[in-house]
Amino acid sequence: MTNKEAFELAKRYMPGGVSSPVRAFKSVGAEPIVVNRGFGAFIEDIEGKRYIDYMLSFGPLILGHRNDIVVSKIMEALDRGNSFGITNMYEIELSELIVKVSKVIDKIRFVSSGTEAVMSAIRLARGITNKPYIIKFDGCYHGFSDSVLVGAGSGVATLGIPGTPGIPKEFAAFTIVLDYNDENALEEAFLKYKNQIAAILVEPVAGNMGVVIPKESWLKRLRSITKENDALLIFDEVITGFRLALGGAAEYFGIEPDIVCYGKIIGGGMPIGAYGAKNHIMEKIAPEGPIYQAGTLSGNPISVASGLAILKTLIKDITIYDRLAELRAYLTYTLSKMLSEKGIPHKINEIASMFTIFFTDKDVIDFKSAKTSDTNIFGKFFRNALQEGVLIPPSQFEAWFLSTAHTKDVIDETLEKLEKAIDLL
């Protein structure tokens, strides 16, 4: 069966043939591929074609596909049972490990997705402060729950659809959307909604409008202004948690949020999410407190065992972060040189082991500037890269990721293929 035939079959039984919209490759004008297997830095489609993978399941596979240590731990857990609906030892061990490594939380609650983690953190913040409003930032994606899909990036931006169909305007009304990196707008919002803001919700490094780096002064102001106004600071580290550093963005930038949301890497590619905070906040959650949140599959043994294997590997060899950053810098420097030699306007935003190429001559500091990127050129670049055997995220507004399986040889092979893709632009 070909990719085209398989996808036609998929469209008969799933909306758009996908379980998540961006997988349809609509914004890049390409025929979707259907994956057969993954191994190391590569995936293979059902036609047997191999691709160097820089999507990495949109971030969680920091050790690459089918890592031996991760697979072994999953099989160990599976041998004991795939679901219990009751506390298991892998869950306890992972919670202890995350708390000790993060240094900014005392307790953690597991859920089944990043969307659930953020939704729960917002409820917790509102329950503690008894205030209704949440501040989020244009282009930051925090899952698809009603109150945060306004001003969302990621797939919403990719498909060019409004963020709020199906969401009552009364729900959206309690979400204040500001520009990322805009300190003045922040000050004005707290004046306008004095004593009504429960929390600021932020991707400390944006990854869902493409990678956008926070200004140091702005990030610090998020922390100080919330303290001044008895509001909470929520870091959505679903992408950056254990990706920027062991302690995520909180450690990387030296800023302590009130609540942290995790996902992706803490499950190593299995469905998971989590949120954590200090004891005085977490004690408000049921069964210790009055704020209710639950999930039948939360703390699933397979997911937490997979995450446990990943985190133990990262802790054992902390130099992984420096090695990945060096390879990323080599890759982006060479890509930028290739694009410049062809006279193609571009900016590359990068940090740790993640980056995004924007086809614009403007510095990308927020969603407005991200949207100046030429998505037609990006679509052509995506199609050319795919043809050459390199899989990048099928959206201008997503991050590329590296894993430990992306060796220097793999990066060099990538550059050879992408040089051909650039020559055809």
Image (tube, rainbow, N blue to C red):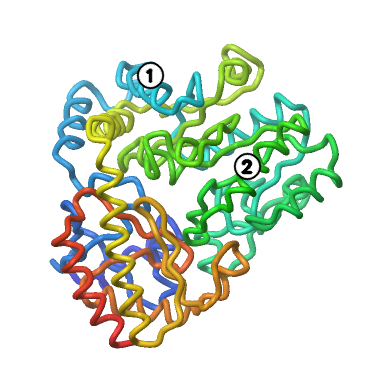
Say what secondary structure mark 1 lies in: helix
Residue tagged 1 = 96
Relative image position of residue 347 (x, y in whole percent): 46, 71
Relative image position of residue 154 (x, y in whole percent): 51, 59
Can you say whether 81 is above or below 414 in the image?
above
Relative image position of residue 49 (x, y in whole percent): 15, 69
Distance between the alpha carbons at the discs numbered 1 and 2:
28 Å
For badge 2, the amino acid type reads Lys
Find residue 220 and name its label.
2
Q: Quadrant of the C terminus?
A: bottom left
- Count neighbours of disc 2 (C-alpha within 10 A) and say few if under 14, some if 14 to 19, many if 20 or more: some
Residue nearest the viewer, comparing 328 with 162: 328
Number of callouts in the render?
Answer: 2
Q: Residue at x 31, y 68 (%)?
A: 7
Relative image position of residue 372 (x, y in whole percent): 57, 75
Residue nearest the viewer, comparing 394 with 319: 319
Quarter residue 226 falls in:
top right
Residue nearest the viewer, comparing 166 with 59: 59
Find residue 299 and name its label.
none
